[in-house]
Structures are given as structure tokens and as C-alpha cells.
Image: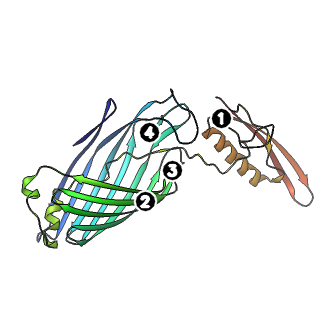
Amino acid sequence: INTEVAGATISTSTRLGYRWLNGDRSWMYGLNAGYDSRPMNTGGTDTGINVTGTEKNAFFQQFAVNAEAVSNAWTFNAYALLPVGDTEQDLNFFYQGGALNTYGLDVGYFITPDLNASAGYYYQNGDMGDADGSGILGRLAYEISSGLTAGVNISYDKAFDTRVSADIEVRFGNKAIKSMKFNSRDNITIQSMASSPQNRNVRIHDYSKTYNVDECWEYESNGTTLSYSTETCSYTSTGYESVTSAEDTKDEAYESCVKRLGAFSYTKNLKTSVSKGVTARYEYQCQTNT
């Protein structure tokens, strides 16, 4: 059980599971499941939007399941992170955060008994579909001494882009395992019996600040990009095009508008052409409430 104080709220991570060795102790297998919570006391933004005085305390939760296998050379870890409760919450007056469903598999190899390299694939979905997609990650971890491990991580997906981080982990207790310092691969499975379960973080994403459809976000006066304080933008036309194409563009504009907490309205005009048949034009407007 891990606990961490964050502001006035305590985050928790609890796992219940079972690990066992095969007959010749060449493999360790494990199953575990549990509950994680994550409070978020958000501050200012780096996007130029002033949210001072509107910050909210959000609290996210998830259930998680994990299956693992460790040999003297390889590690396999399959997991599922399943948010529960209120998975979409306000972070401030402008942004919302969403807890992500994540399903992944990590595969590692012990280059030496103290040096482990791993790579993984995961699929995530959530935050009103804005974070849906696949990702890849890699990790290199080195056990400096018994109970002291340093690691470097890199990951990429379309929601979070490329992220690089480093960590140092210090583990206390379990003197029987801790006192064993092996230099042989034959004992990696024994040491893995006391390792901490992985994938315990509640993963949170907020709406992307970049959208594919910009037409709705224009000043009525000069056609430049809509600022966050502007109340309305001008009607913008898709132009006459095939009915299907015009409908798709209108749907994308609508999605862009509602992500900015805007009210969307539109008018539809049809025209029949001898050469092009029936074409359509949508004029739409998005009004933001500041």
C-alpha cells in the first residue's frame, strides 16, 4: 500500500495479488489487482489563459489489473487501467481533465543482472475521445545497490507527444531479500518476488489546444484567430461542395466549438448544378461564453 500527500488530499495505491515460482525457479509468475486514487490541485496554465481564482480540486480513481512473468533473462508485464467514478472533471473554468483507460504490454531484458532494458506498447482512450490512440515507451533501469535503482524513461503518443523522464527508487524493508546481492542471472526470479507492482498511476489528460478546424475561430472584423476573450466569431461558409464533404466539415467545426465550451449554430443551403449535381454549403457560428 502506497500513500502520498498532495495538498490536503491523500492519494493511495493498493494491490492484492499472488506470486509463485515454477518447479526449477527459472520463472516467477504473478497476478495482482487493486485501486488507485489521484488528487489534482491545479495551478496556472502555460497557454496564456488566465485561470487564476478558478482552479478546482479534482479527484480521480481507477481499478487496475496486472499479469507478470519474470525469467532469469526476460520480463513480461500486461496491464489494464480502468478509471471509475467521475472520469471527467473541471480543472478550472476553461479546462477539463479526463482519466484514461489504458491497456498495455511491456517486455524487458536483463542485459546484466543489474541492468534491465524494456520496451512497451499501450492503447489509451478517454477525455471525450481526444486522447484515443496507441503509444510506445522504453525504459533503462540500473540497480546501483540493493534497494537503490535509477531509471530513464521515454514515451510517445499523439496525446502527450514525446516525454522523457528520470527516476530514482529507494526501497526499505524485507531484510531477507534485501540482504541478498546476487551476481548471477539464476537469482533474478528470486529478487523479483519482492519487487513493487508496476503501472499504478492514474493517467490524466486535458483537451488538446490545437484543432484541425480553424474557420469557426475568426474575428468578425479582421479574420485573425479568435482570442479567448472574444464573444462571437463571424459566420463562416464551407463553400459549395459535395453534400458529404460539407457535412463532414460542419461536424468538425461543431466538435471544435463544443470543446471550447461554445454554442454552435448553422444554416444549410443546397444548390443543384448540371455538372456537379446537388452541392451544399454550411454557414456556421460559434459563440463563446467568457
Of the numbered discs 4 and 2, the one sitting upstream in the chain is: 4
Q: In the rendered structure, which disc, 4 or 1, sits on the residue that comes first in sequence?
A: 4
Q: Amino acid at mark 2?
A: Ser
> Which residue position is annotated with label 4?
87
Any mark on residue 106, and which? none
Q: Tag 1, which secondary structure?
A: strand
Q: CA distance from mark 4 to mark 2?
A: 23 Å
Q: Nearer the viewer, mark 2 or mark 1?
A: 2
Q: Answer yes or no: is residue 197 visible.
A: no
Question: As rendered, which of 231 and 74 lies closer to the eye?
Answer: 231
Residue at (61% x, 35% y) in the render: 261
User: Which dot marks residue 155?
Assistant: 2
What x and y, as percent, mark residue 209?
58, 45
Q: Which residue is mark 3?
A: 131
Q: Which residue is mark 1?
A: 262
Secondary structure at numbered mark 3? loop
The amino acid on which the numbered mark 3 sits, given as a three-letter code, is Ala
Q: CA distance from mark 2 to mark 1?
A: 33 Å
Q: State how far apart marks 3 and 2 are (Cα).
A: 15 Å
Residue 280's x, y, as percent? 82, 49
Q: Identify the mark nearer the N-term, 3 or 2.
A: 3
Q: Amino acid at mark 4?
A: Thr
What amino acid is at disc 1?
A: Gly
The percent coordinates of residue 36 (x first, y second) are 31, 42
**Mark 3 vs mark 1, CA separation in Å:** 20 Å
Give the class, few, some or many, for how many residues have Cα within 10 Å of label 1's Cα (few <14, many ≥20).
Answer: some
Look at the picture and state if 6 lies above or below 208: above
Q: Are marks 3 and 1 in contact (CB under 8 Å)?
A: no
